[in-house]
Image (tube, helix red, strand yellow):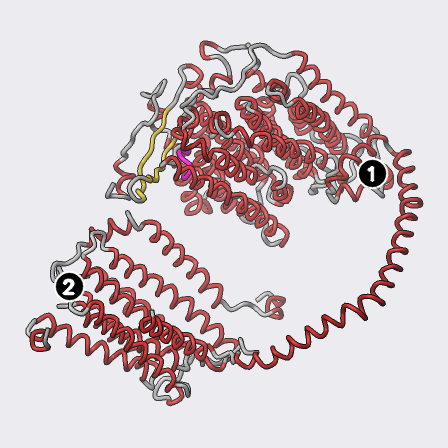
Amino acid sequence: MSLSDWLSEPTNWVFLVVGLGVAGSAFRVVTSKNVVHAALYLVATLGGTAVLFLLLSAEFVAWVLVLVYIGAVIVLFLFGIMITRAPIGYDASLDNNRRGIAAVVSGALFLLMSWAAIDFFGSEPLQGIGEGTSTELLGESILGRFVFPFEIVSFVLLAALIGGITVARKDATPAESEEGV
Amino acid sequence: MTNFLLAAAEEEVHSAVEAAYTSGFWAEYAWIMLVIPWIAVLGIIFFGKRMKYLGAEIAIGMLAFNTIWASILFILNITKGVVYEGAVTIAEIGSNLIFELGWVVDGLSIMMYFVVSFVGLVIFIYAVGYMKGDVRVTWFFASFTIFAGSMLVLVGAPNLVQLIIGWEGVGVASYLLIGHYWEQKENSSAGMKAFFTNKVADIGLIIGAIMVGVTLGTFKFSELSNAAAEHADSLALVAGMIGALLFFGAMGKSAQFPFHIWLPDAMAGPTPVSALMHAATMVTAGVYLMARTFPLYQNLAEDIRPWMVAIATITLFAMGLLALVADDIKKVLAYSTVSQLGYMMVAVAAGGYTAGVFHLFTHAFFKALLFLGAGSVIHAVHSNNMSDMGGLRKDMPRTYWTFVIGSAALAGIIPFSGFWSKDEILVTLGHEGYTAVMWIAIAGAFITAFYMTRAIMLTFHGSYKGHGHPHESEPVMTVPLIILAGFAAVVGFLNIPGVEFGGRGNFTQWLGMREVVMGDHHPTAPDWGMAAIGLGAALLGVLAGLALFARDKATQQERDKFEIPALYPLLRRKYYMDDAALGLVWLIKAPFARAIDWINDYIIDGVVNTMGFLTAGLAQLVYGGLDQRGIDLGFNAFAYASGGSGERLRRLQTGRVQQYASVFVGAAVMFVIGFVIFG
Amino acid sequence: MTLAPVLVLAALLFSLGVYGLLARRNAVLVLLAIELMLNAVNINLVAFEAMLQDSLATGQVFAIFVITVAAAEVGIGLAIVLLIFRNRATANVDEFSLMKW
């Protein structure tokens, strides 16, 4: 399939625009010299991913991504940035001095994975695009066939909740507890 | 089943069992008994603090309702017989494993509904008086209601999954209640000890339940019983393993040796908690599980029954001995409970379904009575130790007389309830051919009578050794004692062999009202010979107790002299192996004991010291010559070599996580590339 | 629309995540990079689901599970970062080399 064939399909145009946006903002997430900007670029990446999910007819997952990630996780990140007093604003020392090695390793990884993707699934068509997955099907699947993983994930969340509180809680020092603080 | 949560509302009820009496409103709606405790818990938490008795009203009202309902079921079962099972599907796993919540109404569960509700009700009323002025009354009643409610969920369970839910609920509630006074470290530690000990045993229960589900494709008790009764081949292959695993779980909750360790520490909770835990909830759960799955043990898992009998026998005898030396009155009762649980377990394991459960039934009344009586005494003297008590007979007459009735029932004095149930256990053991175990159980009856006499003498007779002026507890505490004393005196008559009430026989037939025939042995006429032996052992125990403890030991010195200073601490430290020997020494009393003491001090110590001296000399020789010069040289050379290489290799460990990650990802990429090229 | 371009995009996101994981000093930024990698996995799951048209929607279900676990991971991760920051007054990964010899 030639490039012109590929470009003749309108969904591919949408994919191209969204994909470039996602890739560009993801690149800025890991290279930005400003911590808050990095977090906001992650929002853009995730928003683009949500559009991509809509394109792949996974509406429910797209909205879960928007709600959970953009709504909750990013807020958590911003809190983390504020609390750890990470340098807000331009900061050259956000990267360590092994960027070269990191670039080589991740570049090799990218080449390997994209080679594998193209080699094995090069012309595999995506069926049922635009048909939409019913949320009812997802619900039945989660609470039917996958109820066990579902329960385990709920347990993981509970453990994370308790663990987060326990780890981040400020324990009184011996002197403080003697004072009854 | 597509609509999971709405299913509960839709009430998709299906009766699984061919029933003798199914049309009853009371059986079909028995789930209300399992549900209202949880409504009560919410009520107590949200409104309790604003009420006059801080939420106790809700808990008591709930249990009174349940008691009435259970009594109606009890009467229906006596007159017509009730077997009913209903369930609501909660979720389907895969294509054939179904999770259900439900309620089972049959002879066994009706008996348990009644015991939990009624004994619970009496204890809750008592707790209103006992907990007055406590720091966290509302919280206490909320957890207490969770405790009773979980037990109701457990005994109403038609399948293993719901049983495990109730089982864990009981465990959590016991943790909360044992650690009720968590400001003191040892109390919260006791709670954790109970919880974790049970958790270890629960592993067995859960694995056993999974094996049942995998083997039969269902967790239902009724189908398990039917498969066992029909000797189903698939089940027969793994029955021994399932039986052992379920018993392992039951050992934890029912405090069988060696899982008994949590129970004495569990006395850290308030006394009503101990009473409920020992009488109606928690510890009876294990015996209940054995009774519920009895057809499995009766028909298929016969190989492991001798092992179960052995464990239960150790429990009933060794733990009874420990009750002989405890000074804390609640610990005396705690060890006594463990010992009585051994009786129940030995009966069920030996094949006496009715005998074991009947002992559970009578034990619930008299042990609740004894704990509440002990609580009344503790309330009056503000100490748990019997060395601070004595002479309370005159000050607390109602507590005294009810305590005596409870002790007589526990010791097995005719005509109180414990006599009939213990006699039935002895008869069962004899009939099933466990003669040696039967004689140990008779010796256990002697010990039981002995330690209860000791407890009564030290607590209520002699002279008062505590501080202040003790006085009788208020009616809200003594009336429950009197009610329980009445029941402890008479419930034994329900199961006299050969004596029948109306058309449906006696307790044996009521309890046998199950989905399959239980097929255990029922004597048709009383065995007076066995009764005489059991009663004789109990009376001997009382006499021994009186002989040793009737004389008042007014001062601490006299008590100390009696307690045999050299030996007493050993027993107190629960050296199990020493128990039997030291118990004997104690019986022989002071002169012999002093002689043994003297031998211990001069002869044995001398021998030990000489041995020690010789050993030390020899060790010095070996150490200096052989070890230091010979062997150490080799070790040193080796250590030097590994130390040197470690010194060089450790430089790889920079502690920089990202460097490790680089190496890790890079190596993975290279590995995959290599795999693609060469693979 | 074909599968390969989507997979390539996911591979790019994952590699950028790995780069961020290896090159960033600030612990919060490292966590951000991990989110990128998890997101790439989600794209893969949904894309394969769209290719296979599974009757149970397995890919999407597991994408939701991954999102859930990622939320838990961020919570715990930030709690740990917070604790380290409180103890050592820095959130730079290469400054708390506690595992060093």
Q: Which residue is mark 2?
A: A126
Q: Quadrant of the C terminus of chain B?
A: bottom left
Is label 2 in a helix, a strand or a loop?
loop
Answer whether residue B53 is visible to the viewer in this image: no
Neighbour tally class for label 1: few under 14, some 14-19, many 20 plus, Cα within 10 Å:
some
Residue type at numbered disc 2: Leu
Q: With respect to residue B313, does A98 lie above or below? A: below
Foreground pick, B51 / B372:
B372
Which region is colored magenta? B156-161
Foreground pick, B660 / B428:
B660
- Residue at 50 percent of width and 25 percent of height: B298
| Chain label for disc 1 | B
Residue type at numbered disc 1: Glu
Q: Is residue B279 magenta?
A: no
Q: Residue B158 vs residue B454: left or right?
A: left
Q: Give the Cα distance between marks 2 and 1.
A: 87 Å
Q: With respect to residue A115, does B469 lie above or below? A: above
Quadrant housing residue B156: top left
Quadrant housing residue B331: top right
Foreground pick, B24 / B165:
B165
Q: Which residue is mark 1?
A: B563
What percent of the width, then of the height, locates residue A16? Answer: 15, 76
